[in-house]
Image (spheres, rainbow, N blue to C red):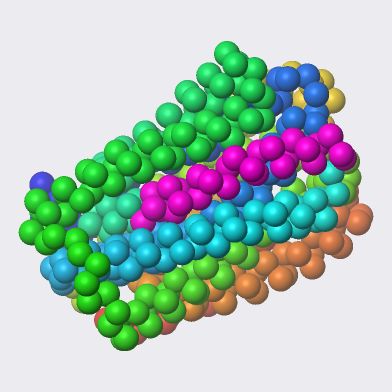
């Protein structure tokens, strides 16, 4: 039974029930990064962890920049689902599939330029640069499968099938962890093993769920996916505008986290490695909290499709409360187990020592960041992409300026203080635009 079709109250309990599958799948995503970091962090040489940090940051920035393939899909699909317009849902998927394939081809074609830009931006040692290029040479070919997975996840979130979207992510993450660990620990492929593990996991997952999704659409929607009549000017312009807005927004967001890596690299490979470790805590907490944001995307779109203002306001209020309470719990867990987790990730004493001195930022950021995470989900579900684009641009520009100043006087602590201020800026700018969503009712 679909909770959303039997109730319009959107209680905290209902939001939690919808979010539970997403919650577990989101935990699996950062675990991949933690495992990869742990595999490289226990090889006894900082260069492996530094190379993994830089190369994965670059690939994350590139792939997350196309997060519009998930977020744009959720907004359009959920609103079409509220109108019971199944043909439009299928057309949206096919249009985004074409965009994903074209984008993938361009990214692969520009691999040499990506490597040159990475080397120029981070200025790694010659040994670290060799490792970075080895990783990029393999990982770049996973882009087509990873972008298609984005589309499928967005589709299932949009039609409120969070269990299926979660199973997809759990499958991808589990395969990634198993294959990377096998290739590194059993075959001693080091950084090549991590890259190859991601490549094999993403294509295996894509093939399995692509077949499942095709059959699901035919069975549930009674629509056969066909690449016909995709070019409808008004529909295409709306999709491109939404995708472009989210692309710009995500590009700025991924740059913000890449900026942490960049600033750390200027302080030396030890700080670069430490910030990589600390970022795993932030990423882990964000994926916990994004479970509510992902659920909210589909629910908000559905409420807007039904023109139900009362339901919309209820889900906004309840989802923000639940997210904040969860963030407090996460910070308490970090407070208790921080040292133990760091010790698992790396056996290098200097990295452990520096990490311990920065634990306060890991504790403070989740409760403050939860508000901007949740507001992101609300705006994406409402397809108010122009607003999230503008809010992100303002926030990142302010963050970069403040980080340069704070890093000069506070060192590595300045990086983390500025990241905290960045989360606050995101919340304030999105709150400023909130009234625009209400005009849809």
Magenta stretch, overall SS: helix
Where is 146 relative to 45, above or below?
below
Rendered image quadrant of residue 235? bottom left
Foreground residue, 363 or 186? Answer: 186
Taking 275 as reference, is 197 left or right? left
Q: The C terminus lies in which quarter of the figure?
A: bottom left
Taking 399 as reference, is 371 left or right? left
Q: Residue at x 64, y 43 (%)?
A: 137
Name the spot of residue 319 as percent of width and height, x first: 37, 55
Name the spot of residue 212 as percent of width and height, x first: 22, 43
Asked whether 133 falls inside the magenta stretch, the response is yes
Name the spot of residue 9 as percent of width and height, x first: 20, 60
Foreground residue, 159 or 431? Answer: 159
Where is 216 relative to 197, above or below?
below
Residue 332 at least partly seen: no
Rendered image quadrant of residue 131? top right
Taking 124 as reference, is 168 left or right? left
Rendered image quadrant of residue 62? bottom right
Q: Residue at x 28, y 82 (%)?
A: 232
Name the spot of residue 153 as percent of width and height, x first: 34, 51
Foreground residue, 107 or 404? Answer: 107
Asked whether 338 falls inside the magenta stretch, the response is no
Q: Residue at x 37, y 65 (%)?
A: 98
Q: Residue at x 55, y 62 (%)?
A: 106
Name the outermost residue toward the right. Answer: 409
Exactly how many numbered labels are in the figure?
A: 0
Residue 148 at least partly seen: yes
The stretch in magenta equals 125-151
């Amino acid at each position: 039974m679909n909770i959303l079709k039997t109730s319009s109250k959107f209680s905290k309990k209902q939001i939690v029930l919808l979010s539970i599958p997403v919650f577990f799948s989101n935990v699996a995503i950062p675990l991949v990064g933690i495992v990869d970091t742990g595999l490289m962090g226990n090889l006894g040489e900082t260069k492996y962890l530094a190379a993994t940090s830089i190369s994965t940051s670059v690939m994350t920035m590139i792939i997350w920049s196309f997060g519009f393939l998930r977020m744009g899909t959720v907004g359009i699909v959920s609103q079409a689902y509220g109108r019971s317009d199944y043909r439009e849902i299928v057309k949206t998927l096919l249009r985004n599939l074409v965009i994903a394939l074209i984008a993938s081809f361009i990214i692969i074609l520009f691999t040499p330029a990506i490597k040159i830009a990475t080397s120029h931006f981070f200025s790694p040692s010659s040994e670290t640069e060799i490792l970075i290029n080895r990783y990029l040479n393999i990982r770049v070919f996973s882009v087509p499968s990873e972008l298609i997975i984005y589309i499928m996840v967005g589709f299932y979130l949009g039609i409120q099938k969070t269990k299926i979207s979660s199973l997809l992510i759990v499958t991808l993450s589990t395969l990634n962890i198993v294959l990377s660990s096998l290739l590194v620990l059993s075959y001693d492929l080091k950084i090549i093993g991590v890259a190859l593990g991601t490549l094999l996991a993403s294509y295996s997952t894509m093939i399995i769920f692509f077949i499942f999704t095709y059959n699901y659409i035919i069975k549930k929607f009674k629509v056969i996916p066909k690449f016909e009549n995709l070019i409808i000017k008004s529909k295409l312009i709306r999709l491109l505008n939404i995708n472009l807005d989210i692309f710009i927004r995500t590009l700025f967001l991924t740059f913000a986290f890449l900026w942490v890596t960049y600033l750390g690299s200027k302080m030396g490979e030890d700080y670069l490695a430490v910030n990589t470790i600390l970022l795993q805590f932030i990423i882990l907490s964000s994926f916990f909290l994004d479970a509510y944001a992902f659920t909210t995307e589909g629910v908000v779109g559905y409420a807007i499709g039904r023109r139900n203002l009362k339901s919309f306001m209820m889900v906004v209020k309840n989802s923000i409360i639940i997210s904040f309470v969860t963030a407090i719990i996460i910070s308490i867990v970090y407070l208790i187990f921080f040292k133990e987790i760091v010790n698992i990730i790396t056996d290098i004493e200097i990295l452990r020592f520096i990490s311990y001195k920065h634990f306060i930022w890991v504790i403070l950021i989740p409760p403050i960041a939860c508000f901007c995470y949740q507001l992101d989900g609300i705006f994406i579900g409402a397809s108010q992409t122009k607003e999230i684009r503008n809010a992100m641009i303002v926030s990142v520009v302010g963050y970069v300026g403040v980080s340069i100043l704070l890093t000069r006087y506070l060192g590595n602590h300045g990086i983390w203080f500025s990241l905290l201020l960045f989360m606050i800026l995101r919340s304030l700018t999105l709150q400023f635009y909130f009234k625009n969503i209400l005009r849809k009712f």
